[in-house]
Image (tube, rainbow, N blue to C red):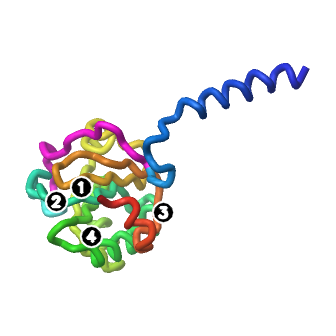
Amino acid sequence: MRSLFCYPLIVLMALLIGCTESSKPANLDGWVDNGRDLSDLELVDLAGNSKDLADYHGKNLVINFWATWCAPCRKEMPALQALSDQLDPEHYAVIGVTVDQKVEPVNQFLSENGIRFQQFIDPQMDLAMSELKVRAFPETLIVNAEGKVLRRILGPREWDDESYYRQILP
């Protein structure tokens, strides 16, 4: 009886595996086909000032959605700072978007941990959850110089590992 149930399941899995797109290398984390153009998005920095993502036109972006209440996010932040320090600022920018409700704990965390890359806040999660469909924290979007999302990466990564980020970034 058990083999009668398992056989169709095995066949279904084989069919699904055969349907996956093989034109993209398997080691590329979270590849997005026909990624959304983000150049029309408006962000709010920690001081309450608005900034258009179009201001970053010509730079590849690493946009990390995070929160101070998220342990994996907190752990990942120093690696993102190391990445920001290693990348050529003429061609790349690392950006953080916190979904915290208040700025004070964010500023305290950033100060205590030496995090200096540009930060924005989305306290109602309008941008993260509604607009960009962020599903978990941390979640990172890799955006090309024209403003199109290339990759969506769920969970923390070793951003300070050059062998990792060289295969992910354009």
Camera-side residue: 145 or 118?
145
Q: Which residue is mark 3?
A: 71
Assess whether residue 37 is covered by the magenta stretch.
Answer: yes
Q: Residues within 10 Å of mark 1 (few under 14, many from 20)?
A: many
Badge number at residue 45: 2
> Residue 30, percent across and down?
43, 48
Q: Which residue is mark 4?
A: 107
Residues under labels 2 and 4: Cα distance?
Answer: 11 Å
As drawn, 71 above or below 87: above
On screen, residue 43 above or below 107: above
Between the C-alphas of marks 4 and 1, the distance is 11 Å
Identify the element where label 3 is drawn.
helix
Main secondary structure type of the part rendered in magenta: loop
Decide if residue 84 is on the left or right side of residue 20: left
Residue contact between numbered discs 2 and 3, judged by CB atoms under 8 Å: no
Q: Quadrant of residue 96?
A: bottom left
Distance CA(mark 1)–CA(mark 2):
6 Å
Please give the range of residues in magenta: 30-45
The answer to whether residue 56 is left or right of residue 9 is left
Mark closer to the chain start, 2 or 4 = 2
Labelled pair 1, 2 in contact (Cβ < 8 Å): yes
Instruction: Give the residue number, with chain letter if any, for mark 1.
Output: 121
Q: Quadrant of residue 63?
A: bottom left
Mark 3 is on which residue type? Answer: Ala
- Comes first in the chain, label 3 or label 1: 3
